[in-house]
Amino acid sequence: MRSWSVRPARAPPTHAFPQLRLCGTRSAFRLDPDTLRRDGIDLILSTVDLDIKFRCIRISPSLTERDKMILDTVLPAVLQQKARQDTPAPHPAPLSRNEAEAVFRLSQELLELVDHIALSPVQPAHSRAELIALSARLFAPDEITADIIGSLLRERDALGDTYIKPFRALLLQTRTECVRHCRLGYVRLASPLYEEGRVISGAVVMLIPPEDDLTCQNLMRDVSALLLGHPELVEHMRQGNRSELTAALTSRLLPCYRRRIRNLLGG
């Protein structure tokens, strides 16, 4: 894959991605889509924002883990698109600004989620109400915020039973302006609660920012499905194994993430 670099990164991405062939660098003011296509360029890697109708990915001057995740996902989709074509395309399909923003948003939410998983220390609780109150504090910087989140979680719990039998826990989820990104956590109880023959060992907490788009909602739906399908993830939560949970959840989320990126790119 041939790529141009605008303001090249300190560590060329070709070191980490051998499928990339860096063809040169240009000023952001000297980029012409028609010329790039004639030169057989497939992709622009830029350290600045570009307003150009050409496939472009912004990376940091020093390649970060976030950049690597985006490249690791986007490059296979671009290569697959090229492979499906009978002849080399002189006019590669451009990545629109909306598509680029959607890719970045999904990448950001996924990384925010796994980077900020919260597993509480072992906590005492003697009732469902106390457990919900502890859950409200998991991502609250102060008591006022905890009261807001707690009110929303209580409303959600009142709408229908939030007990999930495979988890042996409550699943407390809500949209709230108290968070800017998706959040996942678990409140660990020192002793289980017993309620109508049920054993409640803790609470899974999912908070979603109140944006209108479906990025966060779809991501958290994927997380819920993974927790239900892979009991070991919830067991990591119960044991407080944050690093193991983060690694396992990330590895299982990436295939979902790649599918969504391919859909965004029309692949």
Image (cartoon, rainbow, N blue to C red):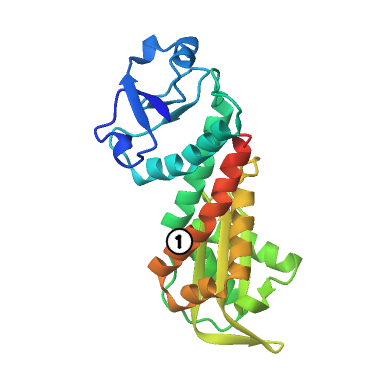
For the residue pair 262 and 136, the one nearer the viewer reads as 262
* Left or right placement of residue 96 versus residue 17 in this view: right
Where residue 178 sits: x, y (%)? 53, 51
Q: Quadrant of residue 220?
A: bottom right
Q: Look at the picture and state if 130 lies above or below 98.
A: below
For the residue pair 68 and 37, the one nearer the viewer reads as 37
Q: Look at the picture and state if 147 lies above or below 213.
A: below
Q: Residue at x 57, y 24 (%)?
A: 87
Numbered marks: total: 1
Where residue 201 sits: x, y (%)? 56, 81
On the question of residue 141 being in view, the answer is no
Farthest right residue in view: 159
Where residue 214 sits: x, y (%)? 65, 44
Where residue 165 sits: x, y (%)? 67, 78
Q: Secondary structure at mark 1?
A: loop
Amino acid on which the number 1 mark rests in the picture: Ile
Question: Quarter of the image containing the N terminus?
Answer: top left
Q: Residue at x 32, y 20 (%)?
A: 24
For the residue pair 38 and 6, the one nearer the viewer reads as 38
Farthest front residue in view: 86
